Amino acid sequence: MPEAAIALEDITRTFSGQAGDGPDSGDQGIPVLKGITLDVESGAFVALQGTSGSGKSTLLHIIGLLDRPTSGSYFLHGEDVSTLDDDHRSDLRNRSLGFVFQSFYLIPYATALENVILPGLYSGKPRTELTARAENIMERMGLADRMNFRPSRLSGGQQQRVAMARALLNEPRIVLADEPTGQLDSTTSGEIIKLFHSVHESGTTIVLVTHDEEVAREADRIIRLQDGRIAEDVKTG
Ligand SMILES: Nc1ncnc2c1ncn2[C@@H]1O[C@H](COP(=O)(O)OP(=O)(O)O)[C@@H](O)[C@H]1O
Ligand SMILES: [Mg+2]
């Protein structure tokens, strides 16, 4: 059996510091993930669905090593990541994971090209190498004539393509996306989904949060969260 890209066992996440409004709400915290057990095969394209507040972003942040579970175990490409310290986690995140968010989080005063290579500079790779790689990715994404534009001069779809190029720069084995088409019209959304497809076809594992049924249909597996638990897990296509 191929090694799972992501293996979660009985993951819980409880947020504290939000005292409820009742006198008995105490300090037990608010359970948001209530026991998530899940394997994602290497190379899979998974859509994560569920109503607002069901825990999708919380789960994606844990998978993306941006947050730690309250309990449970997490193996990333076979490596137990729950015991790693913050430095090793950031290192692993930079090397293996790419993120795409609903808000593109581009730096407004930097050009599209600079936005793509800036995070890569932290890895210590030479700027010339990063630039060459970024140009190559951006050309494939139809951004060849937009590299020197600032984000404010780009359409929403172009901004999201810049954010995707940035996520792909380090050739991550896994791409995590949180409502990447949430701010886009349906035509533009379709273009972005096509890009996710080609990324998937190159062998990258994708976990994509969406409440758009049309976007979810593009995945080969749909996992539905409900109130912090997996309510449904179906293979499609
Ligand atoms: N940092 C946090 N502190 C306290 N509560 C949080 C925090 N992040 C998320 N929550 C709560 O956890 C629940 C699930 O949030 P989230 O994972 O963002 O849901 P989704 O992405 O499915 O809409 C919500 O009730 C939210 O208010
Ligand atoms: Mg969310």
Image (cartoon, grey):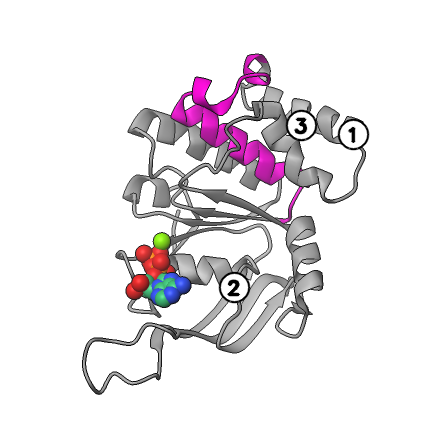
Q: Which residue is mark 2?
A: 67
> Residue at left 57%, top 62%?
6
- Circle 3 packing at 10 Å, graded few (<14), some (14-19), many (20+), is many
- Circle 1 packing at 10 Å, graded few (<14), some (14-19), many (20+), is few
Q: Are marks 3 and 1 in contact (CB under 8 Å)?
A: no
Q: CA distance from mark 2 to mark 1?
A: 31 Å
As drawn, 9 above or below 223 = below
Q: How many marks?
A: 3
Q: Considering depth in this image, is 44 or 193 the residue closer to the camera? A: 193
Q: Which residue is mark 3?
A: 134
Mark 3 and mark 1 lie on one chain; the one further toward the N terminus is 1
Task: Work out which quarter of the rendered image holds the N terminus and state it.
Answer: bottom right
- Res 224 visible: no
Question: Is 148 displayed left or right of 157 in the figure?
Answer: right
- Circle 2 packing at 10 Å, graded few (<14), some (14-19), many (20+), is few
- Residue 219 pos. (x, y %): 42, 46
- Residue 24 pos. (x, y %): 22, 87
- Res 16 visible: yes
Q: Considering depth in this image, is 201 or 130 the residue closer to the camera? A: 130
Is the residue indicated by label 2 positioned so its CB lies within 8 Å of ligand 1? no
Q: Identify the magenta region.
A: 145-173
Q: Main secondary structure of the magenta part?
A: helix
Is the residue indicated by label 1 positioned so its CB lies within 8 Å of ligand 2? no
- Residue 170 pos. (x, y %): 68, 41
Q: Are marks 2 and 1 in contact (CB under 8 Å)?
A: no
Identify residue type, mark 1: Glu
Q: Quadrant of residue 149?
A: top right
Q: CA distance from mark 3 to mark 1?
A: 9 Å
Secondary element type, mark 3: helix
Q: Which residue is mark 1?
A: 129
Identify residue type, mark 3: Ala
- Residue 29 pos. (x, y %): 35, 78
